[in-house]
Image: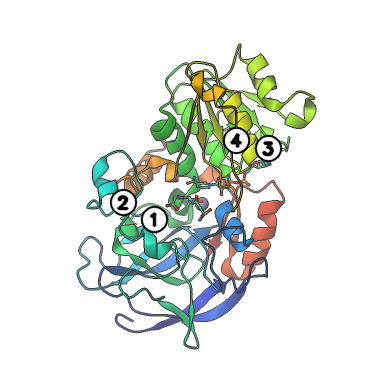
Amino acid sequence: TQGQVIICKAAVAYEANKPLVIEDVEVAPPQAGEVRIKILYTALCHTDAYTWSGKDPEGLFPCILGHEAAGIVESVGEGVTEVQPGDHVIPCYQAECRECKFCKSGKTNLCGKVRAATGVGVMMNDRKSRFSIKGKPIYHFMGTSTFSQYTVVHDVSVAKINPQAPLEKVCLLGCGVPTGLGAVWNAAKVEAGSTVAVFGLGTVGLAVAEGAKAAGASRIIGIDIDSKKFDTAKNFGVTEFVNPKDHDKPIQQVIVDLTDGGVDYSFECIGNVSVMRAALECCHKGWGTSVIVGVAASGQEISTRPFQLVTGRVWKGTAFGGFKSRSQVPWLVDKYMNKEIKVDEYITHTMTLAEINKAFDLMHEGGCLRCVLAL
Ligand code: NAD
Ligand code: AHE
Ligand code: ZN
């Protein structure tokens, strides 16, 4: 297949909110600096649903969504040296080129090399898509497009992993789990003995709890409007539960009262701007830090009284948990193999690509953390 167009199945989003359609898609060979990957497993993340909903200003249609996956390199373009056909890999929507000013800064995991192209659904080289249906181009998504049996990504967006790792599990290390762990370890740098509040107990929030437990947090307060989330959350380190619906007071006041003035660290893992405000305002005066992880829709804005910051609270955010993707995803895979981090526990459902619309329905029903599709 090397050097040839591959025709394979992919789930195509033609329009916002319209069911995805399984199509025969043409996948062009990788050009210079590109890698074609046979995707074996992909999970669904809330961000895919967000873009599909039409609320993402970077959302383009028709496109192939998906960004939490694992597969095997099928072929590589000219000049690609770090991976070769047969390598087991995780595509990374957050690239790492190690050369741009972002990568060199040591201050961020964001990379500038291909971001302009991935934000508009094309490849860097020729600003075109490698996907088409009967010759008509289909946009890429987040530089990954994993809802396809084959995809083409930039070489700076490929993490080569331990070939022993089960791809049907470690696909989750492409987004949700690292995001939560890294929010705690890299963005907040939670110290032992700290108090933590986690807003939203989906995969990202539970990974925050897991990371906080590993960091030695003394109290991990889980907040969710769905009380069914509380049972599972215990297994991820949450020590106390609060359902805002059980209280008349604003949720920030409830947390402040529970914690003698506020928590040391809070995390918003929902994407709701009023919860982001509550998460900041439930932090302790003088030092409390709140990390925004959830993705809010286009046009939404955050607000609070500046006095909250004047009096020492810190507001920040994180993408992919601050992990440098190509360098650290393989390390996370090894941590999973050494049983130092959970992955299996986040997988509540498994299906096939043909069932992808059903998998999206499940996501909205609660009871579902991650659904992994076999391609
Ligand atoms: P999810 O839908 O599984 O989890 C969200 C949880 O929040 C659910 O349990 C829901 O019941 C709860 N919730 C909803 N409204 C609430 C409210 N008002 N108060 C309290 N709880 C509420 O989603 P997920 O996959 O865990 O992702 C969480 C968010 O993180 C999404 O916005 C996603 O797009 C974003 N995300 C960001 C990054 C990043 O790099 N920054 C990476 C992955 C995901
Ligand atoms: N395109 C959206 C923003 C989406 C967003 O914030 N993406 C996160 C990853 S979410 C993964 O589930 C991210 O990494 N952002 C940094 C980046 O460079 O995209 C919008 O609203 O415009
Ligand atoms: Zn995601």
Closer to the N terminus: mark 3 or mark 1? 1
- Give the Cα distance between marks 2 and 4: 35 Å
Residue 199 in view here: no
Name which of mark 2 and mark 3 comes first in the sequence.
3
User: Mark 2: which amino acid?
Assistant: Arg
Label 3 amino acid?
Lys
**Residue occupying image coordinates x 64% and y 35%:** 275
- Judging by the rendered image, the residue that carries numbered circle 2 is 326
Provide the residue designation for mark 3: 229
CB atoms of marks 2 and 1 within 8 Å = yes
How far is the residue under mark 2 from the one under mark 3?
32 Å
Question: Mark 1 — residue?
Answer: 92
| Disc 2, SS | helix
Camera-near label (3 vs 1) is 1
Circle 4 or circle 3, nearest the eye: 4
Residue occupying image coordinates x 63% and y 42% = 272
Q: Amino acid at mark 1?
A: Cys
